[in-house]
Image (spheres, rainbow, N blue to C red):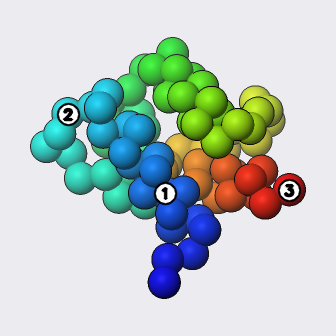
């Protein structure tokens, strides 16, 4: 049975898959900038989609250390459980 964080990570991959090259494997360790080549505005647009999907607000301080899909999943999981 998948944990909540794993389910969130899968949802993040689904949201992101429509915006990136389909040849890239979207794993927990996938880096938004170095692996996917996203620019900061594209990352922010993705985060806005995530916020809307989960009905949460992610503050910029929480995002400052987020570089990968897995790290973002942890942040979202913390906000969803509150």
**Of the image marks 2 and 3, the number of the one nearer the N terminus:** 2
Residue 40 or 58: which is nearer the viewer?
Answer: 58
Q: Is residue 18 above or below residue 4?
A: above
Mark 1 falls on what kind of element? helix
Residue 55 or 24: which is nearer the viewer?
Answer: 55
Mark 2 falls on what kind of element? loop
Coordinates of residue 17 in the picture (x, y in percent):
30, 39
Mark 3 falls on what kind of element? loop
Coordinates of residue 37 in the picture (x, y in percent):
32, 29
State whether residue 73 appears in this view. yes
**Of the image marks 1 and 3, the number of the one nearer the N terminus:** 1
Q: Is residue 32 above or below residue 27?
A: above
Q: Closer to the camera: disc 1 or disc 2?
A: 1
Q: Is residue 61 above or below residue 80?
A: above
Name, please, the residue furthest toward the left: 23
Q: CA distance from mark 1 to mark 2?
A: 18 Å
């Amino acid at each position: 049975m998948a944990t909540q964080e794993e389910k969130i990570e899968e949802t993040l991959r689904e949201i992101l898959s429509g915006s990136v090259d389909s040849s890239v494997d979207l794993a927990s360790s996938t880096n938004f900038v170095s692996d996917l080549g996203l620019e900061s505005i594209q990352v922010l647009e993705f985060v806005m989609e995530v916020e809307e999907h989960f009905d949460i607000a992610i503050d910029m301080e929480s995002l400052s250390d987020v570089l990968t899909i897995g790290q973002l999943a942890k942040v979202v999981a913390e906000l969803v459980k509150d």
